[in-house]
Structure formats: C-alpha cells, structure tokens
Image (tube, rainbow, N blue to C red):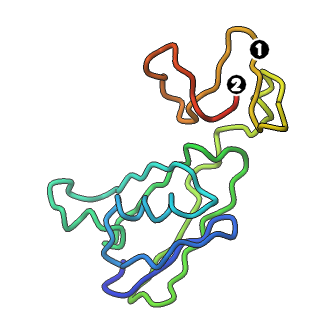
Amino acid sequence: SAWGGHFTVTFRDNTTADIKYNATVNQFENYLEEIGSIGDVGLTLLGVDRQDPRQHQVCNGSTVLIEFYTEYGALPMLQASNRTINGTVSTARVRSSTKENLECSQLGICDESKGLCHCMAGLQSSNGTNTPLSPANSYGQRGDC
C-alpha cells in the first residue's frame, strides 16, 4: 500500500518509467508493455470493489496479478523499486510459467533469417494468448507453430 510518490518495475534488465502511486491498473499495464522486454500482459486487481473507481489503483493495498501472454519459458521475477514511494510495493511469484519456450513449438522448421517458423501441414502461427483466432482461418503474429 502507498500514499504518495513513484515506483518502477524492472523485467529482464528493462525498467519502466516512474509510475505514480495512484496509477490505475490500465495505466500500470501500459507502463509494463512500454518496456522492451514485455510484449502483452493481462492484469487482474484482486480484493477490490469494482464499482468504486478509487479502488482501481495498483497501490491501494490490493494484489495485482500479472499474466504474461507473449513471454514463454522460465521467466525471471519482476523487481519493484520503492525509490520514492511513501509505502511499499513488492512482487511475488504466484505461479511458474505454463508455456514452453521451444523453437517453433517443435511443430515446424525455423527460418532463422526471418525469425519465423514454417509450420507442419495443418498448423499455423498462434496469437500467443491461447485464445481462438478470429476469423478462424486467420494467422497469428507470433511466428510459432
């Protein structure tokens, strides 16, 4: 919980800009996605009254769950810096990664010059979020199989 100041978050040696203590969950997600080592994440704020917009702030004493949609394999911990914050911001691992980081998901051949996979017959690139592609015959942008 915090009542003033700023904090930062570091992931894989990349650090966010200063995040105000009263940033909303949507603003916090944008800060995370602006650093080079994070692609797409989803945030869930736990233990709040969703009808009260004041409780949508990340430093209100609640827990923010962060799910990485586009980073696979054994991920390092996020590191929070309490440099100029009045209060405390901390991180903890809730669950280890459930997505493997295998070349072309072992279902294709990698074209290393382009960084894309040539998938086996009947397979296509995903969107990296485990959600169906729309329309159903479209291809994802991840470059995997």
Q: Secondary structure at mark 2?
A: loop
Q: Is residue 19 above or below residue 86?
A: above
Q: Report the residue at 73% width, 50% height from top.
A: 74
Q: Is residue 71 above or below residue 92?
A: above
Classify 10 Å Cα crowding around label 1: few (below 14), some (14-19), many (20 and above): few
- Which residue is label 1 attached to? 120
Left/right of residue 119 with respect to residue 59 in the rendered view: right
Classify 10 Å Cα crowding around label 2: few (below 14), some (14-19), many (20 and above): many
For badge 2, the amino acid type reads: Cys
Q: Position of residue 17 (x, y in %)?
A: 49, 76
The count of marks equals: 2
Residue at mark 1 to residue at mark 2: CA–CA distance: 8 Å
Q: Position of residue 144 (x, y in %)?
A: 70, 30
Q: Secondary structure at mark 1?
A: loop
Q: Position of residue 5 (x, y in %)?
A: 38, 87
Q: Quadrant of the N terminus?
A: bottom left
Residue furthest to the top in view is 122
Q: Quadrant of residue 77?
A: bottom right
Give the camera-side residue of 140 and 83.
140
Q: Is residue 30 above or below residue 86?
A: above
Q: Are marks 1 and 2 in contact (CB under 8 Å)?
A: yes
Q: Which mark is residue 145?
A: 2
Q: Quadrant of residue 85?
A: bottom left
User: Mark 1 or mark 2, which has the lower sequence index?
Assistant: 1
Q: Position of residue 82 (x, y in %)?
A: 50, 84
Q: Quadrant of the C terminus?
A: top right
